[in-house]
Amino acid sequence: RSKSPKGDLDDLMKIAMFRMETLKRPIESAVVAEQDRGDLLEAYRKVGVNGVELWDIYATKEAGPQGRDRAKQSIAFLAAGYPFEDLKDGKTLDAVIFYDKIPVVGKMLYPHRRFMPMALLGVIALAVVAFLARKKE
């Protein structure tokens, strides 16, 4: 994907067409706003139309700068390999952010997050059994 002015125009047209056809936005809101062009072009070039969709979910006028930051975070996580569907939901995005902060193993733990409470309970149970067995000796 080109970074020339013609390449920018081509990509901006593709983004607008995606917004109109797939996201069913009217042409007035499908056209990329000037203040969003750089970020949206970067998102589109990094992860394709999924980046555009994530941008549109989080970077709303109501959300302001925090929404733009969340959009950029979600796009970075998509580029890092996290599932697109997970990143579309704000609560799940919060979970991704939490697990990503765990050094080294966070990304490996994230897919198994539903089993973490049960695994933690198992570890605690084993620790109690080991403690009681040691106390009897």
Image (cartoon, rainbow, N blue to C red):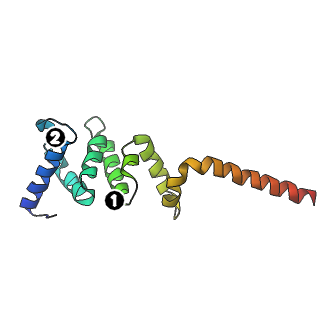
Q: Amino acid at mark 1?
A: Ala
Picture disc at residue 47: none
- Which tag, 2 or 1, sits closer to the chain's start? 2
Circle 2 crowding by C-alpha within 10 Å: few under 14, some 14–19, many from 20:
some
Image coords of residue 38 (percent x, y):
18, 54
Q: Which residue is mark 2?
A: 20
Q: Residue at x 38, y 55 (%)?
A: 77
Helix or strand or loop: what does disc 1 sit on? helix
Labelled pair 2, 1 in contact (Cβ < 8 Å):
no
Q: Amino acid at mark 2?
A: Met
* Residue placed furthest toward the left: 6
Q: Position of residue 131 (x, y in %)?
A: 83, 56
Q: Looking at the rendering, which quadrant does residue 6 occupy?
A: bottom left
- Residue visible at 8% across and 55% down in the picture: 9
Q: Which quadrant holds residue 81?
A: bottom left
Q: Residue 133, percent across and down?
A: 87, 57
Q: Nearer the viewer, residue 6 or 18?
A: 18
The residue lying at 53 percent from left, 57 percent from top is 109
Q: In the displayed structure, does residue 134 sit left or right of residue 82?
A: right
Q: Nearer the observer, disc 2 or disc 1?
A: 2
From the viewer's side, name the closer residue of 111 and 103: 111
Residue at far front of view: 21
As helix, strand or loop, the secondary structure at mark 2 comes to helix
Residue 78: percent from left, percent from top: 35, 55
In this figure, which residue is indicated by the disc labeled 1?
Answer: 79
**Going by the image, does 37 lie left or right of 112?**
left
